[in-house]
Amino acid sequence: MNSLQRITVLLMLLVLISEQNLHAQNIYPSSYEKKVVIVPEGQSRTFMFTNQMGLFYYGETSMPNTSQYHGLSYLTHKFLEDYIIELGSNELSRSKAEAHLMGDKLIRFFKNLSVEEEVSMADSLPLLTIKIHSEQKIPMAITPLISSSNQKQDYILDWSTSDKILYIAQKNHLVRNDDSNYPVWIGICTYPEGEFTPGVESLSNSSQIIEQKIFYPGKINIYLENDVFIFFILGDSKKEVLRNRNQMLKSLNIEIKKQKSQIEGVRQA
Protein backbone atom coordinates (compact mmCIF):
# COMPACT_ATOMS: atom_id res chain seq x y z
CA MET A 1 0.00 0.00 0.00
CA ASN A 2 1.54 3.33 -1.04
CA SER A 3 1.61 6.54 1.04
CA LEU A 4 -1.50 7.97 -0.64
CA GLN A 5 -3.45 4.82 0.14
CA ARG A 6 -2.28 4.89 3.77
CA ILE A 7 -3.41 8.51 4.13
CA THR A 8 -6.77 7.65 2.55
CA VAL A 9 -7.29 4.72 4.92
CA LEU A 10 -6.41 6.89 7.93
CA LEU A 11 -8.87 9.56 6.80
CA MET A 12 -11.62 6.98 6.41
CA LEU A 13 -10.90 5.54 9.84
CA LEU A 14 -11.08 9.03 11.34
CA VAL A 15 -14.49 9.52 9.76
CA LEU A 16 -15.71 6.18 11.10
CA ILE A 17 -14.34 6.90 14.57
CA SER A 18 -16.08 10.29 14.52
CA GLU A 19 -19.35 8.57 13.69
CA GLN A 20 -18.70 6.11 16.50
CA ASN A 21 -18.63 8.97 18.97
CA LEU A 22 -22.13 9.94 17.82
CA HIS A 23 -23.52 6.43 18.32
CA ALA A 24 -22.65 4.88 21.68
CA GLN A 25 -23.69 1.38 20.56
CA ASN A 26 -21.20 1.14 17.70
CA ILE A 27 -18.89 -1.88 17.66
CA TYR A 28 -15.65 -2.18 15.67
CA PRO A 29 -14.40 -5.70 16.39
CA SER A 30 -10.72 -6.49 16.07
CA SER A 31 -9.73 -9.61 14.16
CA TYR A 32 -7.98 -10.67 17.36
CA GLU A 33 -11.04 -10.19 19.54
CA LYS A 34 -12.67 -13.51 20.45
CA LYS A 35 -15.58 -12.12 22.47
CA VAL A 36 -19.03 -12.71 21.00
CA VAL A 37 -21.46 -9.80 21.19
CA ILE A 38 -25.07 -11.01 21.06
CA VAL A 39 -27.63 -8.55 19.71
CA PRO A 40 -31.26 -9.60 20.41
CA GLU A 41 -34.08 -9.36 17.87
CA GLY A 42 -35.33 -5.82 17.37
CA GLN A 43 -32.01 -4.21 18.37
CA SER A 44 -29.04 -3.26 16.20
CA ARG A 45 -25.37 -2.33 16.48
CA THR A 46 -23.04 -0.96 13.85
CA PHE A 47 -19.87 -2.87 12.99
CA MET A 48 -16.92 -2.74 10.61
CA PHE A 49 -14.72 -5.41 9.05
CA THR A 50 -11.51 -4.66 7.14
CA ASN A 51 -8.67 -6.68 5.63
CA GLN A 52 -5.13 -6.39 4.27
CA MET A 53 -6.39 -5.42 0.80
CA GLY A 54 -7.83 -2.00 1.71
CA LEU A 55 -11.39 -3.38 1.80
CA PHE A 56 -13.95 -2.17 4.35
CA TYR A 57 -17.44 -3.41 5.14
CA TYR A 58 -19.38 -1.17 7.51
CA GLY A 59 -23.00 -1.88 8.40
CA GLU A 60 -25.74 -2.74 10.86
CA THR A 61 -26.16 -6.06 12.62
CA SER A 62 -29.95 -6.09 12.64
CA MET A 63 -31.27 -3.55 10.18
CA PRO A 64 -30.61 -2.33 6.62
CA ASN A 65 -27.59 -0.12 6.04
CA THR A 66 -28.69 3.50 6.39
CA SER A 67 -25.61 5.67 6.85
CA GLN A 68 -23.71 7.21 3.93
CA TYR A 69 -20.65 5.43 5.35
CA HIS A 70 -22.26 1.98 5.36
CA GLY A 71 -21.51 -0.54 2.64
CA LEU A 72 -18.57 -2.25 0.95
CA SER A 73 -15.72 0.12 0.12
CA TYR A 74 -12.20 -0.02 -1.23
CA LEU A 75 -10.40 2.70 0.74
CA THR A 76 -12.90 5.57 0.41
CA HIS A 77 -14.70 4.46 -2.77
CA LYS A 78 -17.95 2.61 -2.11
CA PHE A 79 -19.03 -0.17 -4.46
CA LEU A 80 -21.97 -1.71 -2.64
CA GLU A 81 -24.56 -0.03 -0.43
CA ASP A 82 -26.20 -3.25 0.74
CA TYR A 83 -27.88 -6.40 -0.50
CA ILE A 84 -31.32 -7.98 -0.18
CA ILE A 85 -31.95 -11.70 0.25
CA GLU A 86 -35.29 -13.28 -0.54
CA LEU A 87 -36.37 -16.77 0.43
CA GLY A 88 -39.35 -17.85 -1.61
CA SER A 89 -41.41 -14.68 -1.97
CA ASN A 90 -40.36 -13.22 1.40
CA GLU A 91 -37.53 -10.79 2.11
CA LEU A 92 -35.14 -11.88 4.86
CA SER A 93 -35.73 -9.22 7.52
CA ARG A 94 -32.64 -8.54 9.66
CA SER A 95 -34.75 -7.08 12.48
CA LYS A 96 -36.13 -10.59 13.08
CA ALA A 97 -32.69 -12.11 13.59
CA GLU A 98 -30.54 -12.62 16.66
CA ALA A 99 -27.07 -11.40 15.69
CA HIS A 100 -23.79 -12.79 17.00
CA LEU A 101 -20.90 -10.42 16.26
CA MET A 102 -17.34 -11.72 16.45
CA GLY A 103 -13.99 -10.29 15.49
CA ASP A 104 -13.97 -11.85 12.03
CA LYS A 105 -17.61 -12.53 11.20
CA LEU A 106 -21.25 -11.72 11.87
CA ILE A 107 -23.87 -14.46 12.15
CA ARG A 108 -27.59 -13.69 11.99
CA PHE A 109 -29.89 -16.42 13.32
CA PHE A 110 -33.40 -16.35 11.87
CA LYS A 111 -34.87 -18.81 14.33
CA ASN A 112 -38.42 -18.63 12.95
CA LEU A 113 -37.11 -19.81 9.55
CA SER A 114 -34.26 -22.10 10.71
CA VAL A 115 -31.92 -19.98 8.59
CA GLU A 116 -28.43 -18.66 9.35
CA GLU A 117 -26.60 -15.85 7.54
CA GLU A 118 -22.85 -15.53 8.03
CA VAL A 119 -20.98 -12.40 6.87
CA SER A 120 -17.18 -12.49 6.63
CA MET A 121 -14.29 -10.93 4.71
CA ALA A 122 -11.35 -12.71 3.13
CA ASP A 123 -8.09 -11.48 4.69
CA SER A 124 -5.92 -11.55 1.58
CA LEU A 125 -8.53 -11.10 -1.18
CA PRO A 126 -10.75 -8.09 -2.03
CA LEU A 127 -13.85 -10.14 -1.37
CA LEU A 128 -16.88 -10.22 0.93
CA THR A 129 -18.61 -13.54 1.58
CA ILE A 130 -22.20 -14.18 2.65
CA LYS A 131 -23.05 -17.76 3.59
CA ILE A 132 -26.69 -18.82 3.91
CA HIS A 133 -27.54 -22.06 5.70
CA SER A 134 -31.06 -23.46 5.77
CA GLU A 135 -32.72 -26.61 7.04
CA GLN A 136 -35.36 -26.27 4.33
CA LYS A 137 -35.15 -26.42 0.54
CA ILE A 138 -36.42 -23.19 -0.94
CA PRO A 139 -35.88 -20.81 -3.90
CA MET A 140 -33.58 -17.91 -3.02
CA ALA A 141 -32.63 -14.62 -4.67
CA ILE A 142 -29.89 -12.05 -3.97
CA THR A 143 -30.25 -8.42 -5.11
CA PRO A 144 -27.12 -6.22 -4.90
CA LEU A 145 -27.63 -2.51 -4.20
CA ILE A 146 -24.92 -0.73 -6.17
CA SER A 147 -23.53 2.67 -5.10
CA SER A 148 -22.85 6.00 -6.82
CA SER A 149 -25.71 6.32 -9.31
CA ASN A 150 -29.24 5.04 -9.81
CA GLN A 151 -29.04 5.35 -13.60
CA LYS A 152 -28.55 2.15 -15.60
CA GLN A 153 -26.80 4.05 -18.40
CA ASP A 154 -23.95 4.92 -16.02
CA TYR A 155 -22.89 1.28 -15.75
CA ILE A 156 -21.58 -1.60 -17.79
CA LEU A 157 -23.37 -4.81 -16.86
CA ASP A 158 -22.22 -8.20 -18.09
CA TRP A 159 -23.70 -11.50 -16.94
CA SER A 160 -21.24 -14.21 -17.90
CA THR A 161 -23.09 -17.37 -18.82
CA SER A 162 -19.85 -19.34 -18.54
CA ASP A 163 -18.51 -17.86 -15.27
CA LYS A 164 -21.99 -17.30 -13.77
CA ILE A 165 -20.73 -13.94 -12.49
CA LEU A 166 -22.49 -10.58 -12.76
CA TYR A 167 -19.77 -8.07 -13.69
CA ILE A 168 -20.52 -4.39 -13.00
CA ALA A 169 -18.35 -1.31 -13.68
CA GLN A 170 -18.98 2.42 -13.87
CA LYS A 171 -18.54 3.69 -17.41
CA ASN A 172 -16.48 6.66 -16.21
CA HIS A 173 -14.02 4.27 -14.55
CA LEU A 174 -13.38 1.55 -17.09
CA VAL A 175 -9.64 2.09 -16.72
CA ARG A 176 -7.93 2.45 -13.36
CA ASN A 177 -5.81 5.59 -12.99
CA ASP A 178 -3.95 7.59 -10.34
CA ASP A 179 -6.87 10.00 -9.84
CA SER A 180 -9.32 7.14 -9.26
CA ASN A 181 -7.11 4.58 -7.57
CA TYR A 182 -9.67 1.87 -6.89
CA PRO A 183 -10.62 -1.37 -8.69
CA VAL A 184 -12.72 -1.12 -11.84
CA TRP A 185 -15.10 -4.08 -11.48
CA ILE A 186 -17.30 -5.62 -8.83
CA GLY A 187 -18.41 -9.17 -9.49
CA ILE A 188 -21.39 -10.83 -7.79
CA CYS A 189 -21.89 -14.58 -7.90
CA THR A 190 -23.06 -17.56 -5.89
CA TYR A 191 -22.00 -21.11 -5.21
CA PRO A 192 -23.67 -23.30 -6.27
CA GLU A 193 -24.02 -21.25 -9.43
CA GLY A 194 -27.17 -19.19 -9.91
CA GLU A 195 -28.94 -17.55 -12.83
CA PHE A 196 -29.35 -13.82 -13.37
CA THR A 197 -32.64 -12.03 -13.96
CA PRO A 198 -32.03 -8.39 -15.07
CA GLY A 199 -34.13 -5.53 -13.75
CA VAL A 200 -35.86 -5.25 -10.40
CA GLU A 201 -39.49 -4.21 -10.21
CA SER A 202 -40.56 -5.78 -6.93
CA LEU A 203 -38.56 -3.69 -4.44
CA SER A 204 -40.62 -0.48 -4.41
CA ASN A 205 -42.16 -1.38 -1.06
CA SER A 206 -39.08 -3.04 0.37
CA SER A 207 -38.30 -2.31 4.00
CA GLN A 208 -34.56 -2.46 3.23
CA ILE A 209 -34.32 0.20 0.52
CA ILE A 210 -31.85 2.95 1.38
CA GLU A 211 -32.77 6.56 0.69
CA GLN A 212 -29.70 7.19 -1.45
CA LYS A 213 -28.70 6.98 -5.09
CA ILE A 214 -28.47 3.26 -5.68
CA PHE A 215 -28.83 0.99 -8.68
CA TYR A 216 -30.71 -2.32 -8.68
CA PRO A 217 -29.22 -4.37 -11.55
CA GLY A 218 -31.41 -7.43 -11.00
CA LYS A 219 -31.42 -10.69 -9.06
CA ILE A 220 -29.29 -13.80 -8.99
CA ASN A 221 -31.65 -16.72 -8.41
CA ILE A 222 -30.65 -20.05 -6.93
CA TYR A 223 -32.27 -23.01 -5.24
CA LEU A 224 -31.18 -23.18 -1.60
CA GLU A 225 -30.35 -26.68 -0.39
CA ASN A 226 -28.38 -26.62 2.84
CA ASP A 227 -25.65 -24.01 2.04
CA VAL A 228 -25.26 -21.19 -0.48
CA PHE A 229 -22.26 -18.86 -0.72
CA ILE A 230 -22.63 -15.31 -2.10
CA PHE A 231 -19.47 -13.47 -3.16
CA PHE A 232 -18.92 -9.74 -3.78
CA ILE A 233 -15.52 -9.52 -5.49
CA LEU A 234 -13.43 -6.55 -6.63
CA GLY A 235 -10.87 -6.54 -9.43
CA ASP A 236 -9.25 -4.33 -12.08
CA SER A 237 -10.48 -6.69 -14.79
CA LYS A 238 -13.04 -9.44 -15.25
CA LYS A 239 -10.19 -11.94 -15.32
CA GLU A 240 -8.99 -10.69 -11.95
CA VAL A 241 -12.50 -10.95 -10.49
CA LEU A 242 -12.75 -14.52 -11.80
CA ARG A 243 -9.30 -15.36 -10.46
CA ASN A 244 -10.21 -13.98 -7.02
CA ARG A 245 -13.43 -16.02 -7.05
CA ASN A 246 -11.58 -19.21 -7.92
CA GLN A 247 -8.96 -18.57 -5.22
CA MET A 248 -11.73 -18.15 -2.66
CA LEU A 249 -13.45 -21.36 -3.72
CA LYS A 250 -10.10 -23.14 -3.46
CA SER A 251 -9.54 -21.79 0.06
CA LEU A 252 -13.01 -23.07 1.00
CA ASN A 253 -12.14 -26.47 -0.52
CA ILE A 254 -14.96 -26.05 -3.03
CA GLU A 255 -14.56 -27.37 -6.55
CA ILE A 256 -16.56 -25.76 -9.34
CA LYS A 257 -18.83 -28.36 -10.88
CA LYS A 258 -20.68 -27.44 -14.04
CA GLN A 259 -24.16 -28.86 -13.81
CA LYS A 260 -27.68 -28.09 -14.88
CA SER A 261 -29.34 -25.61 -12.56
CA GLN A 262 -32.59 -26.55 -10.86
CA ILE A 263 -34.71 -24.62 -13.32
CA GLU A 264 -38.03 -25.05 -11.55
CA GLY A 265 -36.61 -23.82 -8.27
CA VAL A 266 -34.92 -20.85 -9.95
CA ARG A 267 -38.10 -19.87 -11.76
CA GLN A 268 -39.98 -19.71 -8.48
CA ALA A 269 -37.42 -17.37 -6.86
Image (cartoon, rainbow, N blue to C red):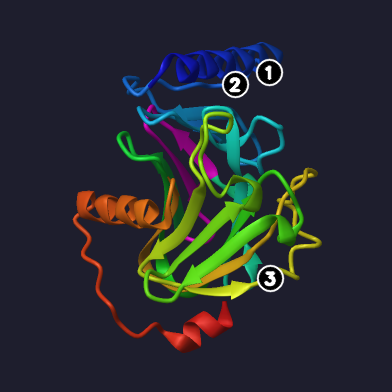
Q: Is residue 106 magenta?
A: yes
Which amino acid type corresponds to the residue marked 1 in the rendered image? His
Q: Residue at x 49, y 88 (%)?
A: 264
Q: Nearer the viewer, mark 3 or mark 2?
A: 3
- Quadrant including the C terminus: bottom right
Residue at the extreme bottom of the image, as rendered: 264
- Tell me the CA gap for discs 2 and 1: 6 Å
How far across and how far down the image is residue 149, in percent? Answer: 73, 48
How crowded is the residue under tag 2: few (<14 C-alpha within 10 Å), some, or many (20+)? some
* 156 versus 268 height, above or below: above
How far across and how far down the image is residue 251, in percent? Answer: 21, 49
> Could you say whether the residue bearing mark 2 is in a helix, strand or loop?
loop
Judging by the rendered image, the residue that carries numbered circle 3 is: 199
How far across and how far down the image is residue 215, in percent? Answer: 70, 55
- Image position of 171 (left or right of 194): right
Q: Nearer the viewer, mark 1 or mark 3?
A: 3
How crowded is the residue under tag 3: few (<14 C-alpha within 10 Å), some, or many (20+)? few
How crowded is the residue under tag 1: few (<14 C-alpha within 10 Å), some, or many (20+)? few
Contact, mark 2 vs mark 1 (Cβ under 8 Å): yes
Judging by the rendered image, the residue that carries numbered circle 1 is: 23
Q: Residue at x 59, y 68 (%)?
A: 219
- Give the magenta range: 98-114
* 10 versus 242 height, above or below: above
